[in-house]
Image: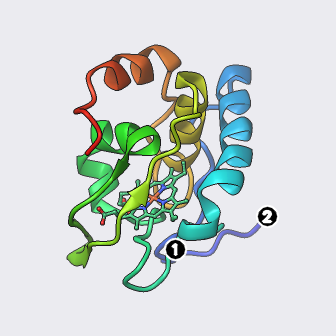
């Protein structure tokens, strides 16, 4: 298989090929397409100045805990991704379980330009228990 070089958001091969990682990743991909891709797009590129990108995002790199929390609680106010300002509210999805959030996080943090490794449900739960109250 040929790999393109120099693309900004080429898909990386996931860092982990264990059955557990693969299960989280595949579930996460389905959940992402169901709950997130209508705004952030299937390829994670976002939509202009309305929906911020996930494929390459310094916000995701620097605000891991906030990203875990915003899936459930949403986010109002402004944020900056790759020097672009966004100020459209993101609705939270309170129905997502801790496991589903860990799976989505595993997917978005190991796709496109990201290679973080698995996000365990234990880690997600710890962060979710400490989220600031939703605005
Ligand atoms: C209705 C549209 C919509 C949906 C659905 C949505 N988002 Fe967002 N998302 C936004 C908007 C708008 C922002 C910017 C919020 C702000 O400006 O405060 C955002 C911000 C983010 C950010 C932080 C900024 C960045 O680009 O790194 C992440 C990460 C993110 N969303 C992930 C998700 C995930 C994962 C899901 C699914 C569980 C999801 N979003 C569902 C609209 C959406």
In percent of width and height, residue 91 lies at: 45, 55
In percent of width and height, residue 35 lies at: 63, 52
Q: Quadrant of residue 57?
A: bottom left
Q: Nearer the viewer, residue 130 or 61?
A: 130
Of callouts 1 and 2, the N-terminal one: 2
Can the viewer see residue 82 in this picture?
A: yes
Q: Residue at x 43, y 69 (%)?
A: 53
Q: Nearer the viewer, residue 48 or 72?
A: 72
Residue neighbourhood size for the residue with mark 2, other residues' Cα within 10 Å, grouped as few (<14), some (14–19), many (≥20): few
Q: Residue at x 31, y 41 (%)?
A: 64
Which numbered disc, 1 or 2, marks the residue closer to the eye?
Answer: 1
Q: Is residue 56 left or right of residue 15?
A: left
Ligand 1, seen in the image, is in the quarter at bottom left
Q: Is mark 2 within 8 Å of ligand 1?
A: no
Q: Residue reaching furthest right?
A: 1
Q: Which mark is residue 45?
A: 1
Label 2: state its secondary structure: loop
């Amino acid at each position: 298989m040929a790999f393109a070089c120099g693309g900004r958001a080429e898909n990386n091969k996931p860092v982990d090929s264990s059955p557990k990682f693969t299960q989280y990743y595949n579930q996460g991909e389905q959940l992402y397409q169901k709950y997130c891709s209508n705004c952030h797009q299937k390829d994670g590129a976002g939509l202009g100045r309305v929906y911020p990108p996930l494929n390459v995002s310094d916000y995701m790199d620097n605000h891991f805990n906030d990203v875990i929390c915003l899936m459930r609680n949403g986010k109002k106010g402004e944020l900056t991704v790759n020097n672009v300002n966004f100020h459209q509210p993101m609705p939270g999805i309170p129905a997502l379980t801790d496991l589903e959030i860990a799976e989505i996080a595993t997917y978005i943090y190991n796709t496109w330009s990201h290679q973080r490794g698995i996000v365990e449900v234990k880690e997600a739960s710890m962060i979710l228990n400490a989220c600031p109250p939703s605005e």
